[in-house]
Amino acid sequence: MQPLRIALTKGRLEKDTIKLFQKIGYNCDAVINKGRKLILPIGNGEIEVVLAKAADVITYVENGVCDLGVVGKDTILENGHCFYELLDLGFGRCKFAVATQKGKDLYGGYKALTIATKYPNVTRSFFEEKNMDVRVIKIEGSVELGPLIGLSDAIVDIVETGSTLKENGLEVVEDVCPISARLIANVASLKLHKKQIEELVDLISKEIDA
Ligand SMILES: Nc1ncnc2c1ncn2[C@@H]1O[C@H](COP(=O)(O)OP(=O)(O)OP(=O)(O)O)[C@@H](O)[C@H]1O
Ligand SMILES: O=P(O)(O)OC[C@H]1O[C@H](OP(=O)(O)OP(=O)(O)O)[C@H](O)[C@@H]1O
């Protein structure tokens, strides 16, 4: 049988995903000892893992070159939805929040606010829903710099422990939404590999609920 191919977000979500697959009985030694390899078998070859950047996980699943993917809800909200979201995996928990300098009255003035973020779509739709006119500037990382060096009035970014904000004199003004890792599936794969995917989802669900 053709292995199920799963695109897995490299970095923060990688360890927890592998831990989950080990718990449901798959041998993950090849991924743990991967070196620089990017495509690796798990179990007895019934699953193949593709290690990718978060947004690329969605591209691979949408285009059907991977059947499944593990990706954060942040990336899903920012990049769109042409796939099925099967499960909330319960790890990679953090949130999107609006933040600015401690004590600043962000919503007090009349001028349109400038917001720096790695997530322009999420940011625009959040402020649109509040009927607030904002200017969004996309930056690639260390988003907290935005208000500190005068690029923006505030940021929309991921907050986990809150220590990056705290150490830079910033604070949360408002939560946007919670985030966690999701299992996603290509629409056609769900029909073509129905049995294999259902069995895997069942095993994972039981482990998450245990
Ligand atoms: N503190 C956190 N900061 C960022 N992402 C987090 C955090 N906690 C959990 N996550 C989740 O982990 C996912 C992967 O984050 P990671 O920082 O590894 O990659 P990335 O955001 O694509 O950044 P990079 O460009 O540095 O690879 C995020 O999309 C998010 O869902
Ligand atoms: O609340 P905390 O636990 O401090 O985590 C939040 C920080 O982690 C992420 O940055 P990351 O380390 O991915 O670097 P980046 O800024 O380059 O994206 C995120 O963008 C915040 O800066």
Image (cartoon, grey):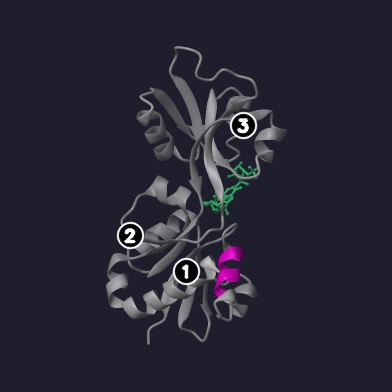
Q: Circle 2 is placed at which residue position?
A: 83
Q: Position of residue 8 (x, y in %)?
A: 50, 65
Q: Please tell me in which quarter of the rendered image ligand 2 is found.
A: top right
Nearest to the eye among marks 2 and 3: give it: 2
Q: Amino acid at mark 3?
A: Leu
Q: Mark 1 highlights which residue?
A: 205
Please state if 187 lies on the left or on the right of 68 as rendered. Answer: left
Which class describes the residues within 10 Å of circle 2: few (<14), some (14-19), or many (20+)? many
Asked whether the beta carbons under mark 3 and mark 1 sit within 8 Å of each other, the answer is no
Which quadrant is home to the N terminus?
bottom left
Task: Please report the residue visible at 65 percent of the width from the left and 39 percent of the height from the top.
Answer: 162
**Image spot of residue 53 (x, y percent):** 50, 57
Spot occupied by residue 116 in the image (x, y as percentages of width and height): 51, 31
**Magenta stretch: helix, strand or loop mostly:** helix
Amino acid type shown at disc 1: Ser
- Distance (Cα) linking label 2 and label 1: 19 Å
Between the C-alphas of marks 3 and 1, the distance is 39 Å
Q: What residue range appears in magenta?
A: 15-21
- Residue tagged 3: 145
Residue under the point 55% across and 73% down: 21
Q: Find out whether residue 19 is within the magenta segment.
A: yes
Of labels 2 and 3, earlier in sequence is: 2
